[in-house]
Amino acid sequence: MKDTYQTLAEPAPEILYKEKNSKFYGYAFPVTSEEEIKVHLEQLRKQHHGAVHFCYAFQLGTDTIYYRANDDGEPSNSAGMPIYGQIQSFGLTNVVVVVVRFFGGVKLGVGGLISAYRTAAQMVLQEAEIVEKTIDIYYKVSFDYKNMNKVMRIIKENNLEIVAQKMNESCEIDLATRKKNAEKIFDIFNHLFEIEIEKI
């Protein structure tokens, strides 16, 4: 079972690609929601208020993939899809790539545009730091304080990550585990007396 994915460690450095007087600025950001993507686009529009086109593509998700490619006024499929093609060829998800174009007075034609947007996207992703992350499943474990040692021993033995915890007479711990171990972890806690586990 595949339980890892590749994404960007941080926003990539800006790149500039020139083609027949047109300038193409490439950007890539790690994202987890469309809200974050909107924020990045708004910032770039403020930064480059003279630019004509803000073309982009993004891919979100690990189990269920959701993507979009936007030509922002360029001829259909001449900008967004070539950018998205680069996201795919680098094998990334939870990422948005934006290419900002300043028109230089010379028309590039559809073939020229496809090539320019693809190249700008490729250049920025080559500059990016790509990291592998695990796909994690989250559980809430609820128990009485007297069972604390039992629960903590399992957490330690299985290298589980504690995301949040509430320690009173009745305790709650939110845990993260890699997807491939999730079923095993659920079963261990589920078979314990006086301890409840649920997916969150």
Image (spheres, helix red, strand yellow):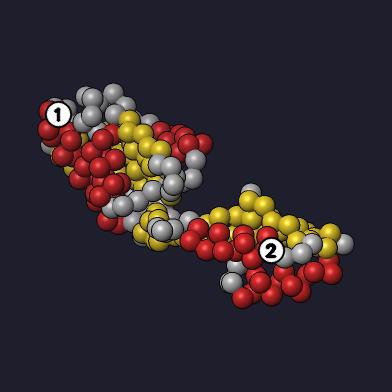
Q: Which residue is mark 1?
A: 110
Let me know if residue 9 appears in the view: no
Within-10-Å neighbours for mark 2: few <14, some 14–19, many 20+: few
Pick the residue in front: 154 or 67.
Answer: 154
Question: What SS does tag 1 mark?
Answer: helix
* Residue 49 image point, x, y percent: 38, 31
Q: State which mark lies toward you, 1 or 2.
A: 2
In the displayed structure, would residue 153 be above or below residue 192? Answer: below
Q: Is residue 193 above or below residue 76?
A: below
The three-letter amino acid code for the residue at tag 2 is: His
Find disc 2 in the rendering and name its residue: 191
Contact? badges 1 and 2 (CB < 8 Å): no
Q: Is residue 196 visible?
A: yes
Residue pictured at 21% horizontal, 31% vertical:
78
Mark with earlier residue (1, 2)? 1
Nearer to us in this view, 148 or 121: 148
**The N terminus appears in which quarter of the rendering?**
bottom left
Mark 1 crowdedness (10 Å alpha carbons): few <14, some 14-19, many ≥20: some
Q: Residue at x 49, y 45 (%)?
A: 32
